[in-house]
Amino acid sequence: MDSNLIAPCGMNCGVCLGYLREKNKCPGCRNLGLNGFGYCRKCIIRNCDFFKTGKSKFCNKCDKYPCKRLRELDKRYKLKYNMSMLENLKNIDNLGIKKFVSNEKLKWTCSNCGNTICVHRKSCLFCNAERKTENEIV
């Protein structure tokens, strides 16, 4: 897991099913190039004019932050997957990207098998151990 896997919206692509799967593996939002995967290639946030200026790598430095699209994405991820892009961006701001990535590695490592846990699944893709929620992580 490294900082190049943290998308502009605050999503950790390293814990995304698209990145973790074996077949048609997504390289992450920052590594897509022009011929990347459908959903990410067309992402409104990733293709925002703000990022074309090169002033920042993350949404939280934009004058429109948090935009409607980011708020909707954050709401969906909090509800379905117990993860917040807005919280991630806040943590990046407060801790710095290196510490944030270090914390993410701890947070998303399966305590049973040591592989990376997918944000989009309730159990580990590799050993099927139940994923712990934020409240259960010590």
Image (cartoon, rainbow, N blue to C red):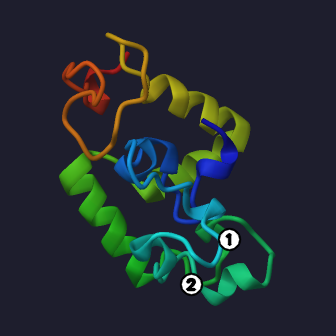
Quarter that holds the C terminus = top left
Task: Give the percent coordinates (x, y) of residue 2.
Answer: 66, 39
Quarter that holds the N terminus = top right
Point 48% across, 56% down: residue: 26
Residue sitting farthest toward the top: 112
Point 44% across, 57% down: residue: 85
Q: Residues within 10 Å of mark 1 (few under 14, many from 20)?
A: some
Quarter assignment of residue 46: bottom right
Which element is circle 2 on? loop
Residue at image mark 1:
61
Assess whether mark 1 and mark 2 are in contact (beta carbons under 8 angstroms).
no
Residue sitting farthest toward the bottom: 49
Q: Is residue 12 something one can see in this rendering?
A: no
Quarter assignment of residue 113: top left
Point 46% across, 78% down: residue: 43
Task: Say what amino acid the circle numbered 2 marks.
Answer: Lys
Q: Is residue 4 something one can see in this rendering?
A: yes
Point 58% across, 83% down: residue: 47
Task: Say what amino acid the circle numbered 1 marks.
Answer: Lys
Quarter assignment of residue 115: top left
Q: Residues within 10 Å of mark 2 (few under 14, many from 20)?
A: few
Q: Nearer the viewer, residue 94 or 16?
A: 16
Task: Give the percent coordinates (x, y) of residue 74.
Answer: 35, 63
Residue 109 in the image: above or below residue 26: above
Residue 65 in the image: above or below residue 113: below
Label 2 – label 1 distance at C-alpha = 9 Å
Residue at image mark 2:
64
Task: Give the percent coordinates (x, y) of residue 127.
Answer: 25, 18
